[in-house]
Image: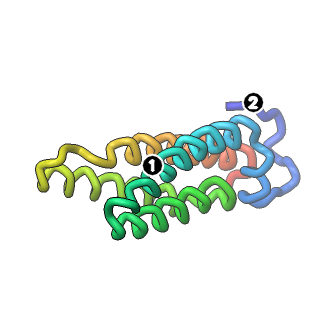
């Protein structure tokens, strides 16, 4: 976390604060790239299973929401999707499918937590 000397800094909205945080944006961008690669693999599975397009739409929408709009709710949706996917995979006997989405969501949420703490330290909101 960067050290801020002045807690009376000019107020900046959280959206603007997140846009200007280099380490946050770098981590989000890197994790988004991994998400896009996994989405590409899901697109390939559409050739085998047409219902996989629903997975692709959900994951692409949520990844774009985190990457471009910096929305924590989308990261939470990816976590829920990953947990659901693992449970369904285990119950169907095909293994813990979707575990990588849980890891991605945890990285996203960890970055949001760090940014939230820093924002609160600077702006007290």
The answer to whether residue 17 is above or below residue 50 is above
Q: Residues within 10 Å of mark 1 (few under 14, many from 20)?
A: few
Give the distance between the C-alpha atoms of the residues marked 1 and 2, in whole angstroms: 41 Å
Q: Secondary structure at mark 1?
A: helix
Along the viewing direction, whichever of 123 and 97 lies nearer the viewer: 97
Q: Locate residue 123, reporting x and y percent.
A: 74, 51
Q: Secondary structure at mark 2?
A: loop
The answer to whether residue 102 is above or below residue 12 is above
Along the viewing direction, whichever of 123 and 99 lies nearer the viewer: 99
Please give the name of the residue rendered at 74% of the width and 45% of the height, measured from the top-left corner: 122
Residue at which label 2 appears: 3
Nearer the viewer's eye, disc 1 or disc 2?
A: 1
Please give the name of the residue rendered at 65% of the width and 57% of the height, measured from the top-left corner: 70
Q: Is residue 86 left or right of residue 65?
A: left
Q: Residues within 10 Å of mark 2 (few under 14, many from 20)?
A: few
Q: Is residue 62 left or right of residue 96?
A: right
Residue 41's mark? Answer: 1
Please give the name of the residue rendered at 50% of the width and 47% of the height, measured from the top-left corner: 109
Q: Locate residue 21, reporting x and y percent.
A: 75, 42
Q: Is residue 25 left or right of residue 104?
A: right
Q: Is residue 34 left or right of residue 69?
A: left
Q: Locate residue 73, reporting x and y percent.
A: 51, 63
């Amino acid at each position: 976390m960067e050290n801020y000397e002045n807690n009376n800094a000019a107020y900046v909205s959280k959206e603007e604060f997140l846009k200007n945080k280099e380490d946050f944006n770098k981590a989000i961008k890197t994790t988004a790239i991994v998400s896009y690669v996994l989405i590409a693999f899901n697109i390939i599975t559409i050739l085998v299973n047409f219902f996989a397009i629903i997975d692709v739409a959900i994951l692409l929408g949520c990844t774009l929401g985190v990457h471009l709009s910096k929305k924590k709710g989308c990261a939470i949706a990816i976590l829920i999707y990953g947990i659901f996917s693992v449970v369904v995979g285990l119950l169907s006997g095909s293994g813990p499918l979707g575990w990588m989405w849980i890891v991605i969501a945890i990285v996203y949420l960890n970055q949001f937590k760090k940014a939230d703490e820093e924002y609160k330290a600077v702006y007290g909101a």
